[in-house]
Image (cartoon, helix red, strand yellow):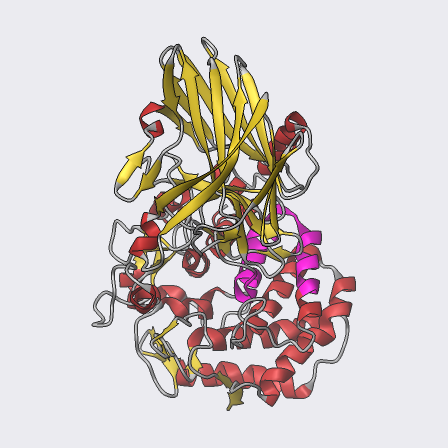
Amino acid sequence: MKFKEEWIISNGNGYYSSSTISSTNTRSYHGLFVSLDPDFSRTVLLSKIWEEVELNEKKYYLDTNLFGDVLHPNGYANLKRFELFPIPTFSYQLGSTIVNKEYFWHPSRNNLFVKYSVSGPPPDRVKLVPLTGLRKAGSMNTFGTYASKYDGYLKIEREGKTVYLWGGDAFEQREEWYRNFNYVIEKERGYGYTEDLYSPGYFTFSGMEEFVVQISDGADSVDAKVARRGFLDRITPAFNRNEFPDRFRQVSDMFVAGKDILAGFPWFGAWSRDTFVSIPGLLLVKGKFELAKNILENYAERYPDGKFSNYVGGTLTPADSPLWYIYAVKKYLDYTSDLLFLKRILNYCTSIVLNYINGYNGIEIIEGLVSSPAGTTWMDAFCDGEFQTPREGMAVEVNALWHNALQSLREFYHRLNSEFPTEMEELISASRKRFQEVFVSNKTVKDVAEPDDLSVRPNMLLAFSLPFPVIKNFKLFRKSIVDLVTPYGLRTLSPSDPRFSSLYSGDQCSRDRAYHNGTIWPWLVGPYITASVRSGIDKGQLKDFFAPLLTMNYVPEIFDGFLPGEPRGCIVQAWSYGEILRAFVEDLR
């Protein structure tokens, strides 16, 4: 498990540190100091630190790497204890000496600290070798030109990227290359997986019981003790709401970066759909109302026409993201009754609905329901020149969201004592009536209508779980999706379907084919719990059933389709946390 189990921590700006418990980087996204760039990409500014400890004329290691097929050095063998929360803490037994190592960020600045403390006889010397590629996460580094300088601190530069390090009794300048690092997860995923890392030299510490290395992308250092206290304060919030697991709360705060929610670590940026789905659980249930409002206003400024792209910088126009925006506004108002905000945002929400009525980018209203092109729902995986789950036509969750948006907008108008447009009032009745006609049949709900698709998928949950459900009494329909429900989330396709894919593995296309065709998604637990509780299903049974998910160290993006599901995709995902938190607080308390 030392080589498989990962850890990750972040500051309030979307910067992060991540590796495995053994300190063996297995992803190209692993790194001690990884920045969030303006375009929401990541840059690995410092990959790792090679750590050697000299004690009683014997050399010990804390670090481990995979070079080709060879593990070296053997730091993992000296690791005797690891604690993930509240901050990653490693304890190494080196003879009669114990060396503890902690990682923590400044809570708001881009300064990372690696703190070492010694109990027992102090080492004669500790040698710390910074290794860097200064390259985009997801790419591989090879031999290149670097500039480095030490003047009380170490500065390393390459192609406009810079990292700074402080620490040590002394710094010995000695340029070296460490070659052929092997990242096994990238190899499994069909990407480049070997790289070379540059070292400008090494720091040394002698006979000390405590020492700290500080890493930053700016030339200013900050006090480590103050930073540690601030970081612990930030990651142990007062939010309780009936004793939700501390680690779950702690990780759920990672995703906020300024006025954005990052969809997942380590690689996702700001995705519109994920943001709006996540706002209630990540922010509103914790009382972070001002931040939620700022994010909603930020998106309105970013997309003044109300036509969101799938992610900031993306080109795909989703059929559901604008409707999720209205959902998030509705939830915000339920928690705050902020009529001043509603006055400012009402015309914007109205323009979103009018976009659908007028039609755009292939999205149109047909007899009261939304029809959309292939690949515009959340099931949008694309490879080999085609969408793997096209779902062209009237997708069930898009139309549940459409009905919810119309009802929400009417409520917004009424809250402000304004007259709701007649054409939209008529659409509410038309959408409800037409939805029942085209989607509901014999206690089952179609996944897509016109053309009809009877695939057993979890998307029908939204018809029961949104603030304004278009169908009621989920208990009558629950059996139709029983094969989808697992303790870790819901499968995206029934195992009895010949297209079902149980393993999310292999190259990009292999994974895309499985992504929404059997893969388990934890975020769907939220709609499932809400729909179940509304129809009278026992809360205690739901808590017990999903306990394996709630007790995980990290809730990932997805799992393999067959149990026990292997965690796949992102290490942690925003809407996985957002929807589980929302449903727990709103429905299971």
Residue 566 appears in the figure: yes
Question: Is 27 contained in the magenta span?
Answer: no
Q: Nearer the viewer, residue 558 or 13?
A: 13
The image quarter containing residue 62 is top left
Of the pair 121 and 427, the residue shown nearer to us: 121
In the displayed orientation, state which residue is furthest to the bottom: 367
Of the 4 image quadrants, the one containing the N terminus is top left
Foreground pick, 403 / 326: 326
Q: Percent from the top left, x then y, of residue 52?
A: 42, 24
The number of numbered discs placed on residues in the rendered structure image is 0
Q: Is residue 423 above or below residue 69?
A: below
Lateral position of residue 449 relative to residue 256, left or right: left
Give the left or right position of residue 294, taking residue 177 as reference.
right
Is 297 inside the magenta-drawn segment? yes
In the image, which residues are magenta? 270-298
Residue at image position (30%, 65%) is 514
Q: Is residue 382 left or right of residue 296?
A: left
Q: Nearer the viewer, residue 234 or 53?
A: 53
Where is residue 92 shown, x and y percent of the image? 40, 22
Residue 488, visible in the rendered structure: no
Position above or below: 116 against 290: above
Q: Where residue 275 appears, x then y in whole percent?
A: 56, 61
**Residue 300: quarter of image:** bottom right
Q: Position of residue 455 (x, y in %)?
A: 30, 75
Magenta span: helix, strand or loop, mainly? helix
* Residue at (46% x, 68% y) in the render: 462
State whether residue 511 is above or below residue 486. below
